[in-house]
Amino acid sequence: MAISNSRWNIRRAAIWVTAFASGVLSEDLLVTSGFSNCETDSSINVQKVDISYNNANKTVVFDVAGTSDREQNVTAILSVTAYGQDIYSNSFNPCDKTTYVEQLCPVPAKSFAAKGTQAIPEQYANAIPAIAFQIPDIAAQATLQLKSLDDGKDIGCVQSQVTNGKTADVPAVSFVAAGVAGAALLMGGAGAIGAAFSGGAGAAGSGAGGAGTVSPSFMEIFGVFQGFAMNGMMSAQLPQVYRSFSKNFAFSTGLIPWTQMQQSIDNFRGMTGGNLTNDSVEFLQKATLVFPDGSVSSGNGSVFRRAIEDVVFLAIRENSVNATSTDGDTPTTTESTIREAVSGIQGYVQQLTVPQANTFMTVLLIVAIVIGVIVVGILLVKVILEAWALFGSFPESLTGFRKHYWGSIARAITSLILLLYSIWVLYCVFQFTHGDSWAAQTLAGVTLAIFTAILIFFSWKIWNMARKLKNSEGDATGLYEDKKIWVKYSLFYESYKKDYWWIFVPVILYMFAKGCVLAATDGHGMVQSISLLVVEGLMLCLLIWARPFERKSGNIVNITIQVVRVLSVVCILVFVEEFGIAQTTQTVAGVVLIAVQSALAGVLAILIAWNAIVACCKQNPHRKRRKEMEKIQRDMDDLTPLDARNSLLLDRSKTNESSITITYANTMADVKQPARDSSPERYIGIAVEAPNTYSPLNAPYNRSLTSSMPMGGLNQNSGYASYNYGQQNGYSGYRAPGGY
């Protein structure tokens, strides 16, 4: 018994190894995936089809089951098409010696089942192109027709999608993309995290801003991934390989497959007027999605799942090859009785097992969870600091966060709104046009209004502040140099040059327009593609014209990202059905599009690693200049007339091209001094004059030391009046009219 169990364990291990080799590596293997009867009124109804072709040994393994009205002899015709081209066709008679199948010679009445292996002749095997085994997500379809030998009539037909086991839908890609975005978040300091460790709300702008303008930033990376996913939502006839690729970035748009959540949303919709008959997670689990290019999507979408199914297939095959059954075994591949034609946003979300009417509620719950994590995390840090304060002293840099933690929460949530605004507009508009629950539509309208109102409010505040600064100071540099303004509003413009602080407004409009175009034109591929090309093109022109980013690297990275977005839409125009472009050309364009977008993602990941090296050496230029001004002001706050920094020798040893005039303000002046604001001008005690200007330092001083001549009394018009005229009015450095 022990020996038998040991043999079975070894056999099972061999099956697992074989399954993963065929399912994960998928070397020269073609397998059917799902099927449907293509004739409704036929004497033979196929209930199960499992066919695989191994190019290594040129064999076909089949497992077919169904029912027949009567006993009859048949001829089977197998044809395979790929990318709209016929690549294989062959007919065989189950009763011939070379293709003999006992269970189908003849086809018995009632139920039948047949399993076995057939060798494929060399001439037919060589007819299959080698590329069919290499291209991921191959767009191929196999059709099996059954004809009666008596009269030649069609008595049965079945169609099935063919896959080679290779796919661009790889879960590891999603994890790597999320890791890249997370690295950008850590490198950039990103909002609330930077605020928490840079002095709270009071340092959110300066602390996070110190590295926030380094490109690529977290928002830029996340925006790129959102763009990939949104391209996959377009209503053009996208190749299956690109749909699978774009599916990897669904997480960036808030779409995370979660069956329990979808069931809860279905229950909520059912109680608020939703129709769950053909739009629920239970319906999707039974349906086969049919896309515009004819490809289908079923439950076995992952490499791991296909490998598990191969394990079952090989285990059954091992024990029942060439077995005969009259009642049929439990099928591993059953007929798809429900076929749902999908495209655009609906097709993208439903391949993630998210019903189209659940889309907005899914994203709303995910965002609510993220906001909850942010709030709880910041409050937890606050509690830790309070406990720390009871038992000891903590770093002074955390004092600001302890006092202004609510500001940190508000800043983090505002940053999240800015990050998600484009897809939020997309999902809200899609909910208005495709939703069926009045409660979900109400929530969509309310949240969209709140998010838009928040962005409008901040835009108005910044614009109004800039207008006031221009009226009082002549320009809007105070947005960068005034710490209070910087802390409150810098997350909108910290990456831009001082002259282009307003660029954030067209960026917000761009995000709004992009979301509206995708949702409002869903189902109209040509209109959608052309409209989106206009939006992306205008944004590219703006970036090239203004080059608004403070750092040169920021301009290069963002212009490159926008160029890729424009090229992506141009490639998607190739997929528009109205243009009638061949399916092979569309597939090539899809592969090129994947290559371009993957290259962009790879370059951005490399730049993030590079920024990890240089981030410690460089600082936000706006913050650097503002810190320098603050240091100068602090130095001047403790400046006294006798301070060495106010000495007559200050800077005189460095140059002979200028002279120095020292003036003193008389604190005992009889004239009341006017009120002054707290600007650095009140500290000015040194005025640098041109070389030709008269000064007591470069003129002879021959006044006799007697009390008969007061200081400044000699030659009142010669320039000595400037020595003490300030005593008459209280203004340091004021010169008498006509003093020179």
Image (cartoon, rainbow, N blue to C red):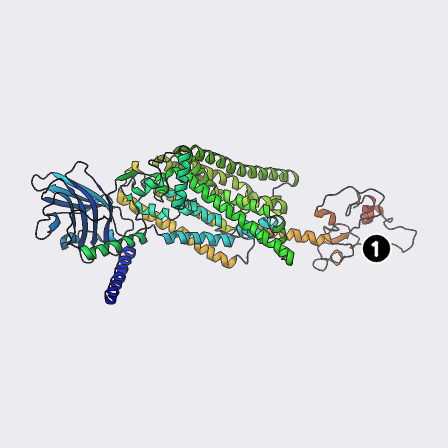
> In the image, is residue 109 above or below residue 166?
above
Residue type highlighted by circle 1: Tyr
For label 1, count other residues whose C-alpha is less than 10 Å away and answer few (under 14), some (14-19) or many (20+). few
- Residue in the foreground of this view, choosing between 732 and 697: 732
Q: Tell me which corner region of the image, top left, top right, bottom left or bottom right, holds residue 255.
A: top left
> In the image, is residue 1 above or below residue 26?
below
Residue 323, percent across and down? 15, 53
Residue at the limit of the structure toward the bottom, as seen here: 3
Residue at the limit of the structure toward the left, as seen here: 150
Location of mark 1 (residue): 701
As drawn, is 338 to the left or to the right of 489?
Answer: left
Residue 10, percent across and down? 26, 64
Q: Tell me which corner region of the image, top left, top right, bottom left or bottom right, holds residue 526.
A: top left
Residue 648, percent across and down? 76, 57
Residue 518, percent across and down? 40, 37
> In the image, is residue 534 above or below residue 634?
above
Residue at the limit of the structure toward the right, as seen here: 708
- Residue in the foreground of this view, choosing between 739 and 555: 555
What element does badge 1 sit on?
A: loop
As drawn, is 285 to the left or to the right of 189?
Answer: left
Q: Does any portion of residue 321 appear in the rendered image?
A: yes
The quarter of the image holding the N terminus is: bottom left
Residue at 37% of width from left, 52% of height from top?
A: 171
